[in-house]
Image (cartoon, helix red, strand yellow):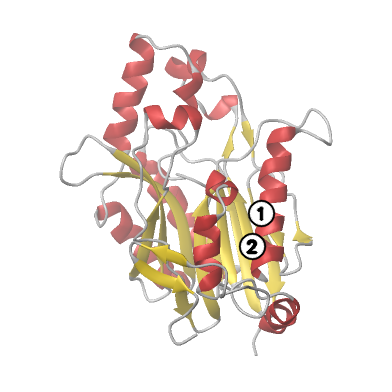
Amino acid sequence: MSPIRLAAIQAAPVYFDKAASVEKACGLIAEAGRLGATIAAFGETWLPGYPFFIEAPLGDLWWEAAALYLENAITLPGPETDALCAAARAAGIDVAIGIAERDAATGGSIYASLVFISRDGTILGRHRKLKPTHHERSIWADGDARGLTVYQRDYGRLSGLNCWEHNIVLPGYALMCQGTQIHVAAWPGHEPLTAPSDPVWARQLLLSRAFASQAGAYVIAAAGLRLEAHVPERFKSLSAFEHTGQSVIIDPRGEIIAGPAEGETILIANGDLAEVRKAKLACDPAGHYARPDLFELKLQGRTIYPPAGD
């Protein structure tokens, strides 16, 4: 089999400017294609950026930033996703990108969504973050389970989750039950390292590595990048921290095979489904390393473990 070329795109969007961010994303997709990527992933809500202002004190400037963030959120489908689909088709690669998705019906709610685009330029699906974390709840609405899906691609089975969804166990297990082989872990990035045991970095790294080991799958842990220089001057007082990226790519045994990445870059690693098979043979969490006589998992009323017929 041909090797799977895995890519984590680590770059800053153009904050509060979705048109410029889409243009930059399309250029990065083209570059990933030139690097021979099979699947390229961006971080959480890369388009139009993570809402960095959420931990700032409430005030007029906070509400102005929040309203502008809503204005720059995108509907799905829409002209922005049309442009991304065209870029994926031109580059000949699959793309997973985090977006701030505006509710098309009400226009007043935003979801932290992960959108999967095929190399032929079609939207495979989207996953809305089930439960925003901490201050994120002031901006993002609760998602749904319709996107807890594994997509069958010619190079393997593809899945993805946002950030701390990797910390709540059952969403990940739902994907493991569907046999995921290549997984996108979309993160906003972490705050600057102050020590090797930095807790933010530890969560991003260890949860991604744990998922890879448990699932027996490659993980593209794509992290966002946002430094003070990327924040518009008007809103700099609302920025309490930076996101410095540190994207990694992890093999099916949980070992880092590329990264952590620094600055704006496209991190690349080669994968091989033979390694996935070896890992799953050792530990298949929804197969031979499970107890269907003890446990059952339902997803929106549908039993996904144990599989039908077991």
The residue under the point 41% across, 31% down is: 137
157 over 138 or under it: above or below: below
Describe the element under mark 2 as helix, strand or loop.
Answer: strand
* Residue 131, horizontal then vertical, whole percent: 43, 42
* Residue 140, horizontal then vertical, whole percent: 37, 36
Given the current orientation, which residue lies at the most extreme left position?
A: 105
Given the current orientation, which residue lies at the most extreme bottom position?
A: 1
Describe the element under mark 1 as helix, strand or loop.
Answer: helix
Q: Which quadrant holds residue 61? A: top left
* Residue 167, horizontal then vertical, whole percent: 59, 47
Residue located beneath label 1 in the image = 208
User: Could you tell me if residue 33 is visible in this image?
Assistant: no
Depth order, front residue of 98/263: 98
Callout 2 amino acid: Val
Query: For mark 1, does the 10 Å Cα neighbourhood hold few (<14), some (14 to 19), or many (20 or more) residues?
Result: many
131 relative to 249 in the view: left or right: left
Depth order, front residue of 86/108: 108
The residue under the point 69% across, 78% down is: 280
Residue located beneath label 2 in the image = 219
127 over 150 or under it: above or below: above
User: Could you tell me if residue 113 is visible in this image?
Assistant: yes
Contact? badges 1 and 2 (CB < 8 Å): yes
First along the sequence among labels 1 and 2: 1
Callout 1 amino acid: Ser
Q: How far apart are labels 1 and 2 at the CA level? A: 7 Å
The residue under the point 63% across, 45% down is: 264
* Residue 57, horizontal then vertical, whole percent: 46, 11
62 over 33 or under it: above or below: above
